[in-house]
Every structure is written in C-alpha cells, then in structure tokens.
Image (cartoon, grey):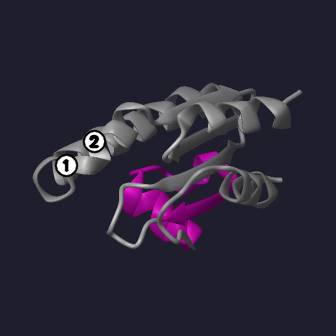
Amino acid sequence: DVKEAADHILNGGDFKDTLATVDNSMALTRLYGLDQAIVEDAAFYTNSNATAEEIAVIKVKDAADIETVKAAYETRIADQKEACKDYLPDEMTKLEDAVIYTNGNYAILCVSNDSSKVETIIEEMFK
C-alpha cells in the first residue's frame, strides 16, 4: 500500500520539516510532470517551503513505466537543486543524497536528513 509505505518512511525517517500530504493529481502533474494514466496509486508528502524534504511513492500500472517515473524523480531533484541553490543552500546536501528506489511497479523518492536511514527503511519494506 503506497500510503502505508509513505507513512512508514515519514515516521521512521529523519525530517526537520513538518511534511504534509499533497493531492495526488496535483503532485503527479505539477511536481513530477507525469501522466496520471500510468499510475495505479500514489502517495506524497511535501515540505513547507522551508526545506527540500519530500516523499513520493508511486505504483505504476505497468512495470514498463517505472523508468518514466524514475526520470521524473530525477528531473524533480534537478529542479529543486536549481530552486534551492540560492534560496536554501543548506538543502543542497539533502538533494545530492536524495533516495530514488525502484522495485517492480513501485518507485520511491525521498529527500531527508538521513538518506541511509531511509534506504534501510525502504529495503526492509520490500523484503
């Protein structure tokens, strides 16, 4: 369950910001530029604009679309780096260490204070 996965990362990860849920259709189109037709389910948490922290968990209908989601995550990170470099320079380290994880029909993006902690949480979920 994508919502459960996102909540598990949120509760177990290291975040200094208070992350809030985002409407799926808004996040998919505005933040990630994805076609909703390829997505079976998704859950998002985004920052308060004080940090670059965020969580995205997307389940695609067809595993063939996982690379499209991964590319969208990479574009999002690049955009965030550009937006934060002058405005929030302290967030650049988090963006450099952003976790992008794919497994089957699932793609996860997480920007947090501790990427190795998040990677461990995600790997445990897929065991």
Q: Position of residue 90 (x, y in %)?
A: 26, 49
Label 2, secondary structure: give it: helix
Look at 43% across and 32% down and name the residue there.
97
- Residue type highlighted by circle 1: Pro
Does residue 31 belong to the magenta stretch?
yes
Query: Pointer 2: what residue?
Result: 92
Q: Contact, CB < 8 Å: mark 2 with mark 1?
A: yes
- Any mark on residue 112, and which? none
Give residue 83's position: percent from left, percent from top. 19, 53
Q: Residue furthest right?
A: 127
What's the CA distance linking mark 2 and mark 1?
6 Å
> For mark 1, does the 10 Å Cα neighbourhood hold few (<14), some (14 to 19), or many (20 or more) residues?
few
Q: Amino acid at mark 2?
A: Met
In the displayed structure, would residue 127 be above or below residue 125?
A: above
Mark 1, secondary structure of its residue: helix
Q: Quadrant of residue 45?
A: bottom right
The question of residue 63 being in magenta is answered with: no
Instruction: Please tell me which residue is depicted at 39% across the width and 34% down the height of the picture.
Output: 74
Residue corresponding to mark 1: 89
Residue at the extreme left: 86
Q: Give me the residue at 42% from left, 40% from top.
A: 72
Whether residue 105 sits left or right of residue 15 in the image: it is: right
Q: Nearer the viewer, residue 62 or 96?
A: 96
Q: Quadrant of residue 119?
A: top right
What stretch of residues is rendered in magenta? Answer: 21-46
